[in-house]
Amino acid sequence: MTTSPPAASASTHPAPADPGTTPGGALLAAHDLHLAFGPTTALASASLEVHPGEVLALMGPSGSGKSTLLHCLAGILRPDSGRVTYGGRDLTAMSDVERSALRRSEFGFVFQFGQLVPELTCAENVALPLRLAGVGRRDALGTAREWLTRLEVPDVADKRPGQTSGGQGQRVAVARALVTRPRVVFADEPTGALDSLNGERVMQMFVAAARDTGAAVVLVTHEARVAAYSDREAVVRDGRVREQVRA
Amino acid sequence: MTVAPALLGLLQSGPRHGYDLKRAFDERFGQDKPLAYGQVYSTLARLLKNGLVEVEHEPGDGPDRKRYAITEAGVSDVAVWLATPEKPEPYLQSAMYTKVVLALLTGRDAADVLDAQRTEHLRLMRELTRRKSEGDLADQLVCDHALFHLEADLRWLELTAARLDDLATSVRG
Amino acid sequence: MSASTPPRSSWAADLALGARMSVGGGRSGWARLALIAIGVGVGVAMLLIVASLPSVVDARTERTDARSIGSGVVEEQGDNTLLTQIVRSGFRDLGVEGRLLQAEGVRVPLPPGVDRALAPGEIVLSPALQRLMDSPDGEAIRGRWGDTVVGTIGPEGLAGPGELTFYLGTDDLDEETATRINAFGNPDEQGGGLGPELLLLGLVGLAVMIVPLASFIATAVRFGGEARDRRLAALRLVGADVGTTRRIAAGETLVGAAAGIAVGGLLLLVAQHVLPPLVPPALTFYPEDLRPAPVLAALVVIGVPVASVLVTLSAMRRVVVEPLGVVRRSEVTRRRLWWRILLPVAGAALLHPLIGGMDDDSSGDQAMVTAGVVLLLVGVALLLPWAVDAVVGRLGRGGVAWELAVRRLQLESGAAVRAITAIVVSVAGLIAIQGTFGAIQAEAEGDGELQGSVFQAKVIDTRSGAVGQEWVDGLTGTPGVRDVVTSTFTLAHVETDPDQLIGVEVGPCSVLTHETGITDCAEGDVIVVATEGAELPTPGTTYVLGEPGSGGGTWELPGDARSATLGEFHLYLSGLPSTIYVTPTALGGADVAEGYESVLVALDPDVPDAVDRLRTTAADVEMLAYVADAEQGSLTGVLGTARQALLAGTIALLVVVGASLLVNVAEQLRERRRPFAVLLAFGTRRRTLGLSVLWQVAIPVAVGITLAIVTGTALSVVLQGGLSAPIGIDWWAIGLISGGAALVVLLVTAASLPLLAGLTRSQGLQSE
């Protein structure tokens, strides 16, 4: 261990067998996270486990801190205190370079909108994580097109995101999230900007494709019908994970 | 009760045996619960009595050699039924609400009640979602209908959970 | 102990990805790239033009050297020698300088650009002079040197295409009045170089050009910054680390910079043909002269992309591009004054050698002063954001348009400030130069003897002896000439002490009042004029007139001689501590010996081009005589040229500033299309939006120009102190430049209104 977890967090966990691994075979776990934005408390002692291959819905009213928790789990935000471990490694102690590397190789992201680069074509957008990971342009684009075909949007490959419909754009985003065969996909209201029908289609394809690749999904949503695609749910209320039920 | 108009409607495309009628009903509308034979025949008997269907006997013997056909009165009855909007359910009598209030009154944790209910709702919703993705369009529409209703319940659960403190004050006060 | 880091894209791939993104994005993407390319291109073109100035000067010098007479000067007359002399003349405010050629043999050298020997009376003209003479305007100069035009001078014999010059064949020259040469070319040592004051002005001028250009390019590179930040945030989300993000941004910037350099190169080609007709005749050059010096060109071609990348990276330092978006650090911290004021204070400190005057040849001081000026100007650029914040923060409420503008500026004034930094720096610099220049010029003009007198022209005849009558006869009767009078100047020395020299000028009262500035004068008066502090001659002293040893008569300074004081400038010309002005009667017939006669001419202001008619007549009397006129007088020569150059520079800068502002406003409008569309959607009038754009441009510009005027005036005062010029504030220059800048702002706003209308007309509310 070159890095050690914060002393406070270590002492609040009684008898951890090994501070680097999470009991119960969790792939990704949050331990007692606290995070405040100025006077606003976003997370107050939030703990959560994500297991390999499961689809976990994070539910809760708006402002409850569910998106903040997702961002902490993904290593995008750093909590004020507490730890996030991924495969036994402490995400909160990693450098930006290491966390960036995780994002492009082990994690995938699907957000409500705006995560596609408007200057690039859809195929180039999907190929982006591969290219950032050093894959050659031709190979990356080939893989990207396969994914677009799999998500039934091969026609948009050479269009820019601005020229596609919302549903198509989200499928492109799903393709981009899965193209590196990540172990965890973080999805924040992935259907939030879509109507019911398109939202259902995107969720069906997303969850099916994620299960195929064996990726775990952390799905933030306030819609029960979207959460119904999950294997289990956790509710975030007032910055705390209210409940966590294993399916 | 929608079984009688549904049977009438099915008969409008042509006369059927009682058994065929049941199968057709189950196929389209049965979903979870297939119709019992008894209910089919008792309903047909009532329709017959009201002159909405008539019986055609086929040559040969057997108890089930009767074919049912819709009458003029039956056709117009279907038309009237289709044109009459269903009365929206007011849902004013809610068992869930009662449970929450009682939990508060008896000093139990109402949030637990709500959480347990949500878990149960979501379990059912998962089930329906799974069926939806495996089934055909009819399955999807029926499941969606149920899902939207369950979602409405869940929204109510969320809202109530957010307002438990206020509710506690007003119930006990 | 963490697992080995997953593979990462290469530098080249990152740069390529950035390049790909800069050309993506459909119409708006191309529009942004075009904006950057045009912005950088204009800047690069200006830099390349500045980088070409040495070549222009070299090319011009090369050609003027080739026709100069230096090592070709010989003593002995021969088969291949000719006599030559320069003829200085002018037309209106333009200088005309020609050369008389008198062949002494058959193998005489030909000046460059002339293809045949000239017989007496034959003349070849520069094309520009030919055009002038052929034009209706040229009536007063036509035939000044005869009518036998036998050709034009080729480009190789001219400093530039606009030069007014000629070669005239003659047989009037002799060894006394001319130089004998056997070849053209190979000049003397470069005489008449720039004095310290002009060198200083030149250095400041260069700084004034470079600083705004640099800030202009920096502004252009940052066009579309907000969109880029969003794009980079999206990249961070999919796993680009900070370093990769920077490289991708660098790749994007490089495309813009490269496109800008290409545009700049094209603009230079255009400038080669567009510029020459626009520059003053004394500075003209041929298109092929305008080519950047290779080293400087390389500096621009390499420096601009490198600087662009640095600017982008430094702009990115101020924002934190996170996967979830962009956090602007500047919003959190208020702009502080203390460190921004360091630079201008340091600059001012470096200027201290100027206080109390600067030595002529201390190059260390000059470097220090130049550095000081640059620091001061850059400091103004740094102070500007703080000043705009401070002012905008205190602005109160007003109409809807005003409030929209003020609130917007309070929220984010960075873009607005960047847009005007170039203007502010250049206006400050220009006011400093113009002010200093105005002071030098006012000094020179204030001492010019022909100012505000009854005489508007003076004929300077280098021949000695009694030529006065010849001029009176020759000039009287010329259209526009009202009066011709002569006076005689000679040296004199105290009879008992040949070393005590004094000047004696004998002439009628009109000349005496003209030259001394006294108001009452009657025939028989004697007036003694001395430099301030010099000892006045004692009445009763006996003087021997004429150069020592020339055998002039003696004369006694009468007791009723009055005294007057003259400015330094005039007496400096004669080099004597004092001069006695004597009316002919008071001289009492004493022999003046070899005096220099000067001829003063009164002109009729109602006759157009009277001076030039006079010049043409004068050329007939004596080709080599020079006619100085009141208006031109002090302006001919280097000072006049510098003024013209400055004017050209001012106009060029205002053009850059205008282009910069327009492009910037266009960029701002493009980025804020949606808010505008929303405002329109709930009923805001277009006029209100237009006004708010105007305020948004005008408020920072007003703050900036005030800052510029204060700094520029202060700088000008310090520079004037350094040049020992009388301290004065050039309100005219301030008014002119500020007014010009304000006009540019108005024009820019007006030009952007159609853009605003177009942007908000239909598609603003539709997302891309």
Image: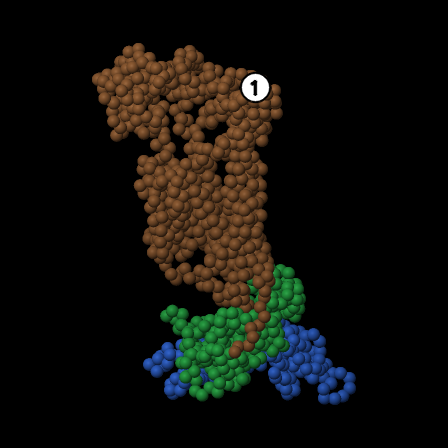
Chain colours: A green, B blue, C brown
Tell me where residue A62 sits by quadrant: bottom left
Q: Residue at x 48, y 52 (%)?
A: C218
Q: Is residue B134 visible?
A: yes
Q: As displayed, is residue C636 above or below residue C335?
A: above
- Circle 1 chain: C
Query: In the rendering, at what x and y percent does residue A145 appear?
Result: 65, 66
Q: Give left or right: position of C571 versus C374.
A: left
The answer to whether residue C296 is above or below residue C610 is: below
Furthest residue to the left?
C559
Residue annotated with mark 1: C104
* Element marked by disc 1: loop
Q: Amino acid at mark 1?
A: Glu
Q: Residue at x 45, y 27 (%)?
A: C93
Nearest the viewer among B107 and C694 is C694
Q: Is residue C658 visible?
A: no
Residue at the image position 37 percent from the left and 52 percent from the top? C343
The residue lying toward the viewer, choosing from C15 and C698, is C15
Measured as percent of width and height from the top left, residue C490 is found at 34, 19
Place of residue B48 in the rendered image (x, y in percent of width and height, measured from the top left): 65, 81
- The quadrant of the picture occupied by the C terminus of chain C is bottom right
C700 and B100: which one is in front? C700
- Crowding around mark 1 (Cα neighbors within 10 Å: few <14, some 14 to 19, many 20+) is some
